[in-house]
Every structure is written in C-alpha cells, then in structure tokens.
Image (cartoon, rainbow, N blue to C red):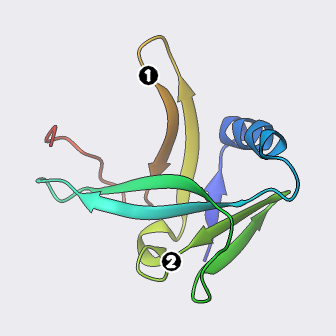
Amino acid sequence: MNVLFTEEATRQLDTMVRQQGDPAPALRIAVTGQCHCGSIHFGMAWEQSPRPDDIVLEHGDLRVVVDPASAPHLDEATIDYRSDPMNSGFLVRAAAGGGCGCGG
C-alpha cells in the first residue's frame, strides 16, 4: 500500500508531529462516509495505539495507520494541504479519482 504526500502536506504534518511531543502519535487516515453522489469522504486523527490489524506506513518521522477497510480506497491516494482565506486543511485525493459534487 502506498500513500503519497505533497510537499505542502509533508511540511504541515512535520510541524504537527513536532507539536505532539515525544513519542508522537500515529496519524490515522480512514474512510468516514460516503456522499449521496457516491464519493468517499476521509478523516484524519491522531492515534496513540494503533490496532493490531492496522496497516502501518512510515513517512519520514510520521507513522500513518490505516484500517483494513479503508486501505483499498487509500492505496495510491495523494494527501495535500491547501490554505486559502476561506478554507484550510488536508485533502485526500483517491487514486480512483472522483470528488464530491453533490454538496451532501
């Protein structure tokens, strides 16, 4: 399984990892739901203790954990960070494409 991080996402995550202290928790990326249009939504959260069946990835000093059900949707996904006056945050782009257009 491979998850790609843009330069800006890596920069933001490196800052966040330093703020978490030592030992830094893992970052969980997971499917959180699906829209009316069928697009998958993802969430991210810090995780102190990964579960035994989690897939653990290393990205620099960051450990990323993914549950087995979310893994197929995240394989070859790209994690980006955007910042503009109206909205800031991480964006997960699944390799299969898509993106919510229904507003749901």
Picture disc at residue 67 = 2
Query: Mark 1: which amino acid?
Result: Asn
Query: Which SS class for mark 1?
Result: loop
The crowding category of the residue bearing disc 1, from other C-alpha atoms within 10 Å (few below 14, some 14 to 19, many at least 20), is few
Query: Which SS class for mark 2?
Result: loop
Residue at x 62%, y 70% (from the top left corner): 65
> For this view, does 61 lie left or right of residue 42?
right
Q: Is residue 96 above or below residue 16?
A: below
Query: Mark 2: which amino acid?
Result: Asp
Quadrant (top left, top right, bottom left, bottom right) of the C terminus: top left
Q: Nearer the viewer, residue 20 or 86?
A: 20
The crowding category of the residue bearing disc 2, from other C-alpha atoms within 10 Å (few below 14, some 14 to 19, many at least 20), is some
- Residue 28: x and y in percent read 58, 62
Residue at x 84%, y 42% (from the top left corner): 18
Which residue in the protein does label 1 denote?
Answer: 87
> For this view, does 60 lie left or right of residue 6?
right
